[in-house]
Image: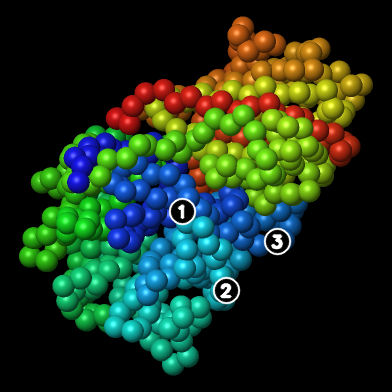
Amino acid sequence: MGNVTITNPIIWADVPDPCVIRVGTAYYMVSTSMHSMPGCPIMRSENLMDWRIVNYVYETLENNDAHNLLDGRGIYGKGSWAVSLRHHNDMFYVCFSSNDMNQFYIYRTADIENGRWERSVIAGIHHDPSLLFDEGRVYVIHGNGSIHITELTSDVMTVKSGGVHQRLFETERDGIMLRCEGCHANKLNGFYYLFFIEWPNTGNRRRRQLCYRSRELLGPYEHKVILDDDMGYRNNGIAQGGIIDTPANEWYVVLFQDHDAVGRIPIVLPVSWVDDWPVIGMDGKARLAFKVQLPSSAPAPLVISDEFEYDENKLALNWQWNHNPDNRIWSVTARQGWLRLVTGNVTSSVLFARNTLTQRTEGPVCIGITVMDVSQMKSGDHAGLVALQNHFGTVGIQVAANGNRYVAMCVNGGGGGEETVERLQYEDSLIYLKVHFNFENSVDIASFYYSANGEEWKQIGSSLKMKYTLDHFMGYRIGLFNYASKHVGGHADFDFFRFTKVGNNV
């Protein structure tokens, strides 16, 4: 057994609404992925500190114009929310609600790392659900403020006819801006424990973690605030998550903290027990670093560089598409060692461009670089690198109606439309592009550069003040894009994507 140091945040990137389980010596974590596809990433760790992506629950959630980014709006900030992950009788289960579909989804597989997931769909929203297996029966506990319990069939695939289906309790209203939600349910030592996040508008006025407990599933429940701390970061509370044990019966909790433009980042804290209540941290305070008796392992990068050297048309798990991809018009095999993005529909903004290939960004500072062959772009095409959120910034090539190429930096000019901040004529067929992200202490500035040779860089346009907005509900991602505003069929080829993270997890 090793002597590992947990350093918070464990991942300085957008991994919101984490839900963690332990199976043997392995920990598995799932998180919200909303409009990014494939969805519901599964990560594995041996020590709660070092995580790697091993699978996704689904390739696409639905096949309609909104999910395919063809309706002029998309499903930004919707899709999968607040996923619950559980393991029972050699099966893994995932469930979540989708607000845009008004449906509750349940997936199951026997092989969480390599298997395909069987799905079931139930009508209606079960907000921020948590699965609970209890003495041969299975329930989902869900809700916001008004907390409900719904019994499912033993195969966990539909609502049980005649089963328990009722309100459990109402959480406090007075002085509360956001009432309890984000349930994580456990049964331990004769108690039912329900963990929630809430956001008061009095006192510290930040998100905090609550625990409700009862000896009876249907109550009555008593509750306590078990963490109200920001770890010294801008009064951003640390909350929403569940507890997890080790093989040595030590306890921890995995929560998240808002870090503005980079997103909601996961935090691990120790848990002790006093009078059968969980106590988080030390003297009510979150800890930046502490030792755990768990095995050491080599950290795997969450965001990777990629030379696009693939033998089949399949990407590394670190990549996700912005909405459903059109798999007919992208390739990493059409030109060996290059990613090819072909335009397939006409649009007017990167926000509505299909086949934008993205990864997360990471704090405190990170840099993404690519080189692009633009020789086969058509008039009206726009391709390059994007810092993606609603308040986006791009750097890349625009092709004018007469075929002239311009390197341009653009932003959201309002309503999702692109406003060109600066553009300069560009003659070469190859262009190097770079975006520099600074998230340290929520500075949240992105800067944009181009080069003809990858050595002499010129800044273009203006620095982007990045903003985390709830219409996207996601931290900034970096993406490779190509779209047509006039004629489809042109393509841009990307030779590589190189990512550098600068700074430590402090």
User: Which element is circle 1 on?
Assistant: strand
Judge by depth and name the residue closer to the eye, 505 or 47. Answer: 47
| Residue farthest along the front direction in this orientation | 311
Q: Is residue 160 left or right of residue 60?
A: left
Q: Which residue corresponds to the image point at 35% horizontal and 41% vertical from the top-left?
A: 50
Amino acid at dot 2: Val
x, y percent for residue 495: 68, 26
Please report whichever mark, 3 or 2, sits nearer to the chain's N-terminal start: 3
Q: Which mark is residue 121?
A: 2
User: Circles 1 and 3: CB distance less than 8 Å?
Assistant: no
Q: Is residue 198 left or right of residue 502?
A: left
Q: Which residue corresponds to the image point at 76% horizontal and 23% vertical from the top-left?
A: 373
Q: Which residue is mark 1?
A: 42
Please report whichever mark, 1 or 3, sits nearer to the chain's N-terminal start: 1
Q: Which residue corresponds to the image point at 48% horizontal and 24% vertical from the top-left?
A: 500
How far is the residue under mark 3 from the one under mark 2? 14 Å
Q: Which residue is mark 3?
A: 63
Amino acid at dot 3: Asn
Q: Which residue corresponds to the image point at 51% horizontal and 38% vertical from the top-left?
A: 360
x, y percent for residue 212: 23, 67
Q: Dividing the picture into quarters, in which one does residue 297 lie?
A: top left
Q: Is residue 225 shown to the viewer in this render?
A: no
Residue neighbourhood size for the residue with mark 1, other residues' Cα within 10 Å, grouped as few (<14), some (14–19), many (≥20): many
Q: How many marks?
A: 3
How far is the residue under mark 1 from the one under mark 2? 20 Å
User: Circles 3 and 2: CB distance less than 8 Å?
Assistant: no
x, y percent for residue 145: 36, 67
Camera-near label (1 vs 2) is 1
Q: Dividing the picture into quarters, in which one does residue 456 lie?
A: top right
Please report whichever mark, 1 or 2, sits nearer to the chain's N-terminal start: 1
